[in-house]
Amino acid sequence: MDDLLREFLTESAEHLDTVDAELVRFEQDPNNQTILRNIFRLVHTIKGTCGFLGLPRLEALAHAAETLMGQFRDGMPVTGPAVSLILVTLDRLKAILADLEATGTEPAGSDDDLIGALEQMASAPIAPPAPVAEIRLPDPVVRELKPGEVSLEDLERAFMEAEGPDPFDAPLAAPPEPASPEPAKVHEAAKSPEPAKSPEPAKSADAPAAPAAQEGEGGVAKVQTIRVNVDTLEHLMTMVSELVLTRNQLLEIARRHDDSTYKVPLQRLSHVTAELQEGVMKTRMQPIGNAWQKLPRVVRDLSSELGKQIELVMSGAETELDRQVLEVIKDPLTHMVRNSADHGIESAADRKSAGKPARGTIRLSAYHEGGTITIEIADDGKGLDLAAIRRKAVERKVASQAEVERMTDAQVAKFIFHPGFSTAAAITSVSGRGVGMDVVKTNIELIGGVIDINTQLGRGTTFTIKIPLTLAIIAALIVKAGAQRFAVPQVAVLELVRVDKATAQKIERINGSPVLRLRERLLPIVTLTGVLGQDQEADAVDSGFVVVAQVGRQRFGILVDEVFHTEEIVVKPMSSKLRHLPLFAGNTILGDGAVVLIVDPNGIAQQVSQGSQSGAIPVEAEAEETEAADAKATLLVFKGGAGSYKAVPLSLVTRLEEIESAKVEWVAGRPLIQYRGRLMPLVPADPSIEIRASGTQALVVFSDGERAMGLVVDEIVDIVEERLDVEISADRSDLIGSAVLRGRATEIINIAHFLPLAYDDWARGPKKADKRGSTLLLVDDSAFFRDMLSPVLKAAGYSVITAASADEAVATLLSNPRVDVVVCDLEMPGRSGFDLVSAMRKVEGRVAGLPVIGLSGTIGAEAIERARTLGIVDLVAKFDRSGLISALAEIDVASLAAAA
Amino acid sequence: MMQAANSNATETIGTRDFVTVFVGETMFGLSIDRVHDVFIPAGVTPVPLAPPEIVGLLNLRGRVVTALCLRRRLSMAPRTGEGAQMAIGLEQGGETFALIVDGVGEVLKLGADTHEPVPINLDARWRDLTLGVHRLDGRLLVILDVDALLAFDTQRRTAGAA
């Protein structure tokens, strides 16, 4: 393929894209002559060039389209079908161009169908001539030609010289006969006029400049450009990267030597290199508008296909970002806009009935923010149906019902990024097949970007994408942890805080988890050596620098030993053998030639939330705690008051609810809601929580028989199953203590404190102070019941030891003199609970007199009789938690009385 | 050394050239066409959480190279003696690796007559990594399979690391 043709192909493709976008604009704003002129001119250029190059098919089509547009210019009303027809024509042109590119020759075929339709359209409405004939403007060129530009007249002449079918002689001039397209094509090509040959070079070089100059208002602004092969740029980039490295090496050497003679030239070299780097980086930058160009057309086609009215508003198209990044986000963006149009925006009728304007809006905006670019795709449609997503998630077994219920809306919304997830009731040709959003997310994450969803039912959905400006060179903070240096991408770094035991900024610990008070907020800290699994000295942990990082909405501090400087580093990918390590984003060579690893803040953020890091110093077990291994407890974690994490044993919780704040009623100054036909008092989990005035309010419902209480919390966070290692706090009655759950310091709330706040007479639970120190042996063969009851009993203030069988229980009783009370399942395989109690009664001393509460699935007369003979204090049904607690309370009272 | 090997390579057909390396007392052979470099490793950056075979990363003339310890790859006892180690530069799939060994010997030209298959009683791990054995005067040369050496499943490690 000769260069001329190749150049023609690239240009035409660009022109056609512009025409696409412009046409859509024009349809909305039919009186805008500037846009029309642009379109007309672009099509005209294509037609003219085709003539020169001897491409009859393209020429004929372009000519027919131009004719119709000429009618628009002459005042013919712009109709949707007419624009659609032109768009279809443009698609055909593109298809022919694609073939041309692949084979080097114009493909055989006939375009009579389109040409006919175009001409019909052009001639039909001419009957009622445009009333405003004055609109017809003279030919648009009004300014002086720049050197090298071709005037419209020249173009017109060139076009006239090129043979093309006469529009008004359609049947005669219709090009290649459909019957024998091949010979006809040869014939046409041979006919290609000789005179056209000479002006060719000038023409093809200059043609693009002309429309560029014409594009004044609107339209993606084009500046004078040359085409450079991408490979050339890439190579240049690599070389500059190497140059930067060498410069850094030189600077490093200069730092160590005091020879000033070469310092000045080195300084100069440094500057020049920096500028060169910046310049080369710029060549890679492209306006994001390039990725958007096709979107107006996409939206227009969609709206006619779906019968919706959709407007696409774009802002920040000039925001520049790296070519490579642009390539990666192009398709995801298109996909998301399609999704918004298809799923987000409702039909005009639905919108009207919802009190919204019939025309839906998709807003696409891009802007710089620090070292990243933020792209927002917002629609004012119906928003995500979170309930449907929850259902779907359970159906698809992506999450369990319980998991789904405790998830926040934001978490639920993210399910749409799951492969094969679609809640669309009907699968349309546009979307709804559940492919795509997961790819979108993968693509964005691939380039270190993050995507967030914000959705409001009935109001619309906003996707926020944050992506790095460039991938090749990043600014990084060089830090030292342990014996090694690491690079931390500066994008993620918010600030640096120096911490020292002696100063005000010091690291505090909650059950061994380091935290830092930073401007009235508690920042979780991880030590870099800790997450990297390296040993560290205990002393070293509390002094150094905290790199405050933010990933998504998660903020955390990374404790490092030293911070050196920031450096522009060239990111080199991790070796394939090391790519599975989530903590590293790559590696680089520093100025001194050393290889350092680039820490991936995303990877660390994951570690922070998983709490699997060993950075926390293990705290010695509390002496009061029993040595017996506590069974794992399932806890509900929520945010309550000042962002702190609190937890309550899940077994105590009846339901989780989200209520409309408007439903909260106030009676005698106390908040209540109507809940399942009854009034339920609401109690804040922390004095600092206020019941929200609007929106939804998360509640944790506790119930006891007929009565229920709603604990007002900020947000339900998680359900965790972990070994409950509670550090008892003595000074607050609303807390049992604190524990580390998933690496976060979490306060375990004492429900007994809250119940009386809801009902004055609900103070059935024994006073906490009385029970402290009581040790309870729970004997049950079922791990499930042990797990369920342990937290309940712990919450009631007992130290709990468990035994899985009567034999084990006897052994524990004999070896552990601290047991104060025994709670025992009476029905166990092997030796039953009755056997255990009778064995206990036979033992000498204290064990014989221990109070025992029996748990039984069914309480029959026989069992009661047998229990009485064995001196079992009380029989409680297995599921009756409150019964158990009150039975225990009676024992406490009795033993206190006995002691007195 | 490499120069000599290259000129010899074309002399006789049927023989192959091997770069000999040492780990402890054992002599190993690496096919010469896989060896790109022989250098003294310096400034190795350890990679926390990496598989044990990977010693770290090092800078070889502006390229970042993953250093692999042959001793650990073959599950041999840890090195006791002091002294400089050597590295063999290998390439696979566009990436450069450095195989850390105790020492590098001469290049040997060996024919099929001294070649033996891998003895079946060899440790399973070794069997997967070796292509055969050459009987030399007074000692044996174990031929290593470079591709197998560099193909260790990170998958297994991922599970371990997670």
Image (spheres, rainbow, N blue to C red):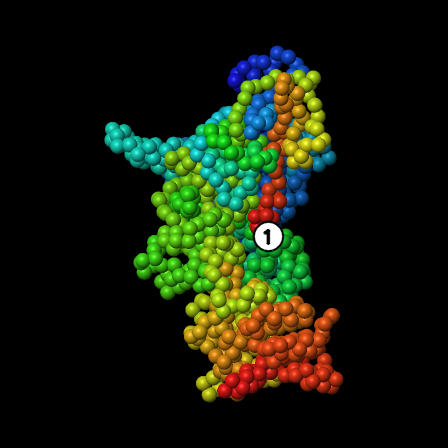
Regarding mark 1 in the picture, which secondary structure is present there?
helix
Residue at (46, 38) in percent of width and height: B45
Mark 1 surroundings: few (<14), some (14-19) or many (≥20) residues within 10 A: some
Amino acid type of the residue that numbered disc 1 sits on in the rendered structure:
Asp
Whether residue A188 is visible = no
Q: Nearer the viewer, residue A676 or A814?
A: A814
Residue at (48, 67) in percent of width and height: A623
In the rendered image, which quarter contains the N terminus of chain A?
A: top right
Label 1 is found on which chain of the structure? A
Q: Is residue A782 above or below residue A417?
A: below
Residue at (56, 38) in percent of width and height: B53
Q: Nearer the viewer, residue A533 or A522?
A: A533
Residue A6 point in image, percent of width and height: 54, 31
Residue at the outermost left position: A260
Residue A608 point in image, percent of width and height: 49, 56
Residue hosting label 1? A438
Residue at (59, 27) in percent of width and height: B26
Residue A690 point in image, percent of width and height: 44, 75
Residue A493 point in image, percent of width and height: 40, 51
